[in-house]
Image (cartoon, grey):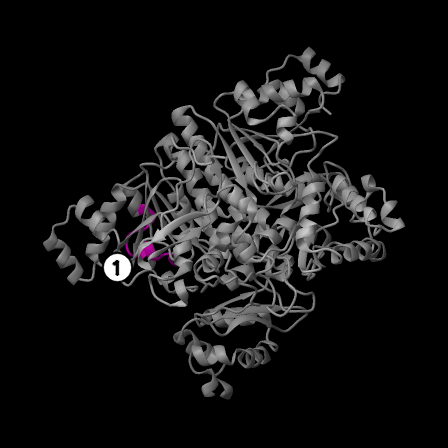
Amino acid sequence: MQSKALEGVKILDFTWIAAGPLTTIYLAKCGATVVKVESMAKPDGVRTSPPYIKGKAGLSRSMQFSNDNANKLSIAINLKHPKGIEIAGRLVAWADIVAENMRPGAMEKLGLGYEDLKKINPSIIMFRSSFAGQHGPQSRLSVTGTELQGLCGFTILTGYPDRDPIPPWGAYTDLTVPALSVGMLAGALDYKRKTGKGQCLDLAQFEASLHYLSPAILDYFANHRSQTRNGNKCDYAAPHGVFRCKGDDRWCTIAVFTDEEWNAFIMAIGNPPWTSDPKFAGLVERKKNEEELNRHIEEWTMNMSAEEVMNLLQGHGISSGVVETAADLLRDPQVKTRRFLQKLDIGEGETLSHQGLGFQLSKTPYETSTPGPGLGEHTEQVCREILEMPDDEFIELFTSGVFE
Amino acid sequence: MNFESTTSSSILESFKVLDLTDEKGMLCGKFLASLGAEVIKIEPLGGDRARNLPPFMNDTPGQEASLYYAGYNTNKKSITLNIETDDGKAIFKRLVKDSDFVIESFSPGYMHKLGLGYLELSAINPRIIMTSITPFGQEGPYSQYKSSDLMCFAMSGLMYLVGDPDGTPLRISVPQTYSLGAAEGFGASMIAHYYRERTGEGQYVDVSIRDSMIKATIGILPECEVNQRVMKRGGAYWVIRHTPNKMLWACKDGWITFRLHGGTFAVATNRELVKWMSEENMATDFMLNVDWEHLDMDEADDEMYKKFEDPVGKFFMSHTRQELFEGALARNIMLLPVSTIEEVANSPQLAFREYWHEAEQPEWGKSIKYPGAFIKASETPCLKTRPAPSIGQHNEEIYKERLEFSNEELALLKAANVI
């Protein structure tokens, strides 16, 4: 058996919804033991997100939840019960990392703030992910990535300059922060291994996400320009856009950056007469007449499938790609080669393709081995194997409702 | 409040990175540098081509004026080196011997063709972690495709989900995909680093920019696989399964984002909004009587959704963004304004957290602000921002002091177009 990069790493995971679980899933897939803490009263909200196994709703039946929480163990603890907090404390003593993405102050209220954790386990790493960070005038608000993408500027930068902006799908910032969090966590684990020191990591999703907008932010600070949305245009390329192809709602991108690529493009589309118009000679002219250029190109793409356009142009060394739908991704040959989707049994005879990570490690490949856990599925296992709890204690706690 | 610890260590202090990336991977090295690593950007003789990317300082194009480059290469050093020459390869290998990471974003196979692939480099230094960041990864039918941000955004599945339902699919106007791939490379390299420090073994990290993007398509893959339903873009609405759920709302002076969430976690925020609306006599009877505990937005049909949308929309239109944001903060309602970049730059929250780092770029004769620490770490804080290097700014330090080349040798290497 191949070894795992994070074998032996122990994580107590209080995160829920997206930005948190999508962080700890990297660690779980790379071999860490991740114990996810929930309760019947406060399950991870994604558990109520369809589609469900066999189309039947239920806290342990959500497929999206399974995708986002593969490889993790689930324990149900009622943290409002005094014994529940004690159990949580025993898991804190076991863990290397405690991860959470609650509203700032909520962990303190439970008696699980960083100071509390340190008393139990002085070398604990506490990873806290929140929208604006643990402190500040806006820190106490709870929001999701849906709202945060607007505050960060991603929304104002999407759409056409003369029309309303458009939010980039559901919750873009839930994508921008996990890999950064993972990098810091792996580093903090190494630092702890070498020095014995833990620490508190305060990630503000707002702050981390702004790194992806650096060019626009520096443009503001240097030139006092507040950049805005620009359709699919690019200042230094033409054509640079998305073109309608044959079929229902089928599209393909085309981006031409250099004269060499432009000449190859003309060849690829069969050297039609319009291309010799001086209006399109050189980038400056093409930028000036971009709308007309795009109309000519779309007349050509309209008669071809998106795949034909991509294959033909790529064959001539021009950047072009199909605007893929979910159905396209599920049958995409490159996705298959990368084995990005991993089919797992999720119970009752059903399977689901679980998404992988964006990388492969040559010596310690990650694995997607078990589907997202049912709520409390591993309560007994965690108590017996990790906490080494005697039977009678487990039964007593169980009957008094601690594991609900 | 003091956020920057003074007696701190850095996680990657004393670790060295050779950074060969162009715009596809620059952000990876920037994050490694912010954890304290010495990151040497190895540029071709004329400078990295990302130095030609706009925007520019004072809107004046020039290789030392690209703000795109400046933003993604902070805290790095720069040397020039032509790794396609024999002397260049030899120098690169000498540097590898003493380094901990190599990051590159060339077309798959290029480094191997030069004799600088992972097998060759790990033979020189078995501890080396080599991270390649490419559009589709090293192997497979698309691996040699000519890339662009536009194409990676489209092929990740995200573009199909952005735009008006009957309009052209859209990307985000500031290129995103390469930065996300680079961030994935950072996370992966650090995981490999943890393993290397524990076992002494380096390894090869193969990042696919497209794969790193796919998870932004939250929800669409299970829905398609299980129900054969292809979800698509809905403009201001997030069209999840049956019900359009509005994300972007107009208000008096712009837009806000807000979503009517169902389920237990949104009960409090929904009640608070209705309370606020009723204080201003804008809550309808329907709104006042919803059973929020049992509201399931997936069950709501268009007609029912309208009964939320109309009064809520009117309420938002009667307020400015600032009024709505302040109300949301006071009442804990899940609502945020749609900011302009200028507003982001002037955010009181970011100012309170001392987020922006001011750094002076000698070439510009002035200092500007940069995005600061991506995370606040109590024991190993991110480094203060140092501006991106000029082309070959550290040639002297690396070639003369570290590799101990004589002036004569350096002159020769320069004449032979090696450095």
Is B173 situated above or below A369?
A: below
Q: Is residue B231 visible?
A: yes
Residue at left offset 45%, top offset 87%: A278
- Dot 1 lies on which element? loop
Q: How many marks?
A: 1
Q: Which one is in front, A162 or B97?
A: A162
Q: Is residue B259 left or right of residue B387?
A: right
Visible residue check, residue A350: no
At label 1, which amino acid type do we have? Answer: Glu
Instruction: Name the chain under label 1.
Output: B
Q: Quadrant of residue A190?
A: top left
Q: Residue at x 66, y 34 (%)?
A: A373
- Position of A378 compared to B393: left or right? right
Image coords of residue B303 (percent x, y): 85, 57
Q: Which residue is mark 1?
A: B84
Residue B359 location in percent, x, y? 38, 50
Between residue A240 and residue B386, name the one nearer to us. Answer: B386
x and y, in percent, of residue B77 in the image: 30, 49
Q: Is residue A31 above or below residue A387?
A: below
Within 10 angstroms of label 1, few (less than 14), some, or many (20 or more) residues?
some
The residue lying at 40 percent from left, 76 percent from top is: A259
Residue nearer the viewer, B365 or B24:
B365
Q: Of all residues shown, which one is farthest toward the left?
A: B408
Q: Is residue A221 magenta?
A: no
Q: Is residue B203 above or below residue A105?
A: below
The span shown in magenta is: B106-119
Check if residue B107 falls in the magenta segment.
Answer: yes
Q: Quadrant of the C terminus of chain B?
A: bottom left
Q: Residue B257: horizontal and vertical position, in percent?
A: 67, 53
